[in-house]
Image (tube, rainbow, N blue to C red):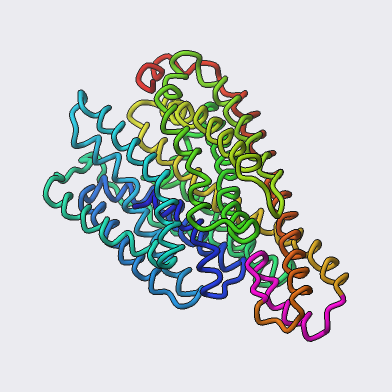
Amino acid sequence: MTFIDGTVVNVALPALQADLHATITDVQWVVEAYALFLGALILVGGAMGDQLGRKRVFLFGVVSFTAASIFCGLATSPRMLIIARGLQGIGAAFLVPGSLAIISATFSDADRGRAIGTWSGFSAITTAIGPVIGGWLIEHVSWRAAFFLNVPLAAIVVALSLRFMDESRDPSRTARIDGSGALLGVFGLGGIVFGLLEWPPLGPRHPLVLGTLGLGTLCLVLLVIVERRARNPMMPLDLFGSRTFTLANVLTLLLYGALGVVFFLLPLDLIQVQHYSATAAGAALVPFAIIMFTLSRWAGGLVARIGPRLPLTIGPVISAIGIGLFARGGTSGSYWSSVFPAVCLLGFGMTITVAPLTTTVMGAVETHRAGVASGINNTVARVAGLLAIAVFGVLLSNRFDAEVEPRLDRLALSPAASVEIGKELPKMAGAELKNVAIEPGQRAAVQRAIDEAFVSGFQLVVLWAAILALAAGVFGAGIPSALPAKSRSEAA
């Protein structure tokens, strides 16, 4: 459910933008509202499962996630959809962390590896087929069907869980759950994201932008102070005393930030500018998932054979080259010459990186703290995309405005047409011109100007995302060539 939802929503963005008349800021919030609450609360969800019962919390997450999915499908305005996506993120925060913990508690040591392998296989398969199925539903039914798809899946999950799943919990976890840390995380990340998303329409000096950025920064500073003093912190900061753990998480922040912003903008470019169908846009990323699924077992053994440094250096560099290749696409182009090579290189680079990165994070700390270390790294990966989309959204908006205005000025439009077109520009490539009173030739010229301005912004963001991925490789090169002797065999 969560892997399908994470990939299908990006493909659905152009359709829901057109149907709900949403601006590019609204579209960003559709993605960010979900990522904000999931990223800020995922550690709390894991802790609640350990303390209150993993089955109970897992089922609560499934039901909450599904109810929010129905709310998403029934939304009649961008604001309703954004609120529903936030509720979906809260449900996912209780659903996601319990899955592997339940598998670990259910299966014996002899069967656990195969069970986790099956979990990984299904994750890869749904990541591959989700956008294609979702794209077909969006194209032939409605974007709302992409959210309603969760209802029958949830019914199956609940039935199987009630029939076959045993309750489990961590008897050692008895301390109070770190609610203050969770609230500070939500308000800190939320304030910064809100300020960055509202920066383009309101301006950098607007009191609301300055106030929310300041509030977000203050809450994150307080989060560090609170987590240092908490008896049972949501995020134990002493783990960052390990150089390997710290470098691995910086690498995660940079690389997953680059990945998140590319996967957010690419469907908009393919559907709105290059006029792919929703199904074709979903299928465009299938090679990425196939490569990761096919080579993941091989990549999983790299740390044991050659250590973590080489794959965590080379993998991000290959990913950066793949990301950079997306900039070659314009307002039109062949999939096989522009998109396919970029998708394949990015998939290969991420395959080399992901399994060794997980192994490195788990092996950088004591065995009994591997669970919380993995949870922190998962949180960093989620927050990376959240922040990158907000930050690069400002860059995209500024480049789009700088490019589109002079292009439109050269078309000598009437004042009335300029006003009508100006109302559509906040939608960027999703601008609707069919009701603007201009000649067909001028309408085509205006659409071309908008598309070219969006592509210019897309290319700029993609190149900066490639730089982020290269920087991740630099931090990977600083990771020791071998894990600590005590942890290496266990992590491998």
Q: Which residues are magenta?
A: 412-433
Q: Horizontal and vertical percent for residue 446? A: 76, 70
At 65% across and 42% down in the image, what residue appears?
338
Q: Quadrant of residue 371?
A: top left
Q: Quadrant of residue 490?
A: top left
At 48% across and 59% down in the image, what residue appears?
186
The question of residue 150 being in magenta is answered with no
Q: Horizontal and vertical percent for residue 247? A: 56, 31
Q: Horizontal and vertical percent for residue 366? A: 38, 26
Instruction: Name the dominant secondary structure of the magenta segment.
Output: helix
- Quadrant where the image shows the C terminus: top left
Q: Give 448 or 394, whichever is nearer the viewer.
A: 448
Q: Is residue 33 left or right of residue 421?
A: left
Q: Horizontal and vertical percent for residue 270? A: 60, 54
Is residue 444 at least partly visible in the picture?
yes
Q: Give 474 or 7, whichever is nearer the viewer.
A: 7
Is residue 211 at least partly visible in the picture?
no
Count the labels in the image: 0
At 61% across and 36% down in the image, what residue appears?
341
Q: Is residue 380 above or below residue 8?
A: above
